[in-house]
Image (cartoon, grey):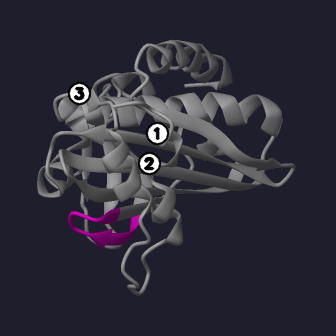
Amino acid sequence: MNFNSICASAVSAVAALTLAPAAHAKVIDQSDAGFTVAHTAQVAATPADVWKMLRTPDKWWSKDHSWSGDAANFWLDSQAGGCFCEKLPDGGAGVGSVQHARVLFSKPGQMLRLSGAFGPLQGEAVTGTLTIQIKETPTGSALRFDYVVGGYMRFKVADIAPAVDAVIGEQLAGLAAALGGALPASRDEAAAGQATPAKETGLDSVAADLAKDDSATPD
């Protein structure tokens, strides 16, 4: 997996997201030191069902963003310190493995936070933090992926940020598809996503604008 392949995959992901207006994505911050991308989507599944699916990345994380070429080799231990890892089949010298990320925070049905530099970023001196948030809505759940990357890398931020944005969006699209497909957000759901969450230790304030990008979408 290299920068050329991630960019090629990004083009496909961008096209897929363009055809699926229910999912929203953007590079929300960018500097020489790093960047942040955010993606939101609505699904008909309950938070409990979303959480169950999150714990089985082999069902939704794209094989195109694996080292083995087979999503069946992914697994996730969803407790703090647990590994989002991938088995590398025995090529004659023994079975290998890859750590894509490590779990930092795990609150079933609400939030999963992982630390990991995905794909070609793994070979750079960067830190990547992926926060996956789940909020109950009148018709199911609202999902948000925030991926924050910072540190030294040999890529230009202006080049890599849009590519990573599309790749992270592809994973949210895969999760939504595995849960029955993304839904257009109604005004009521957008309002629910914008409501300030209850004060709770460790819960990100960024959840307050979970459905912000959907607020202008008609019912």
Q: Amino acid at mark 2?
A: Ala
Q: Mark 3 sits on what residue? A: 181
Tell me which residue sits at (64%, 28%) in the image: 163
C-alpha separation, residue under disc 1 versus residue under disc 2: 5 Å
Count of labels in the image: 3
214 over 147 or under it: above or below: above
Q: Residues within 10 Å of mark 2 (few under 14, many from 20)?
A: many
Location of residue 104 by image quarter:
bottom left
User: Residue 139 location in percent, x, y?
Assistant: 18, 45
The residue singled out by tag 1 in the image is: 214
Residues at marks 2 and 3, CA–CA distance in whole angstroms: 17 Å
- Disc 1 crowd, CA 10 A, few/some/many (<14, 14-19, 20+): many
Q: Nearer the viewer, mark 2 or mark 3?
A: 2
Seen from the viewer's position, the closer of residues 102 and 35 is 35
Q: Secondary structure at mark 2?
A: loop
Start-end of magenta stretch: 103-111
Quadrant of the rendering where the N terminus is positioned: top right
Question: Residue 102 lies in what quarter of the image?
Answer: bottom left
Q: Say if mark 1 contacts mark 2, CB within 8 Å.
A: yes
Question: Which residue corresponds to mark 2?
Answer: 211
* 173 left or right, relative to 78: right
**Residue at the (55%, 28%) spot, across then down:** 166
Q: Is residue 97 above or below residue 60?
A: below
Percent x, y for residue 216?
Answer: 51, 36
Residue 84 seen from this side: yes
Q: Of the residues shown, which amino acid type is indicated by label 1?
A: Asp
The residue closer to the viewer here, 187 or 120, is: 187
Residue 142 is situated, as x and y percent measured from the top left of the image, at 32, 49
Q: Nearer the viewer, mark 1 or mark 3?
A: 1
Residue at coordinates 19% horizontally, 51% vertically from top-left? Answer: 138
> From mark 1 to mark 3, how far is it between C-alphas?
17 Å
Disc 3: CA contacts within 10 A as few (<14), some (14-19) or many (>=20): some
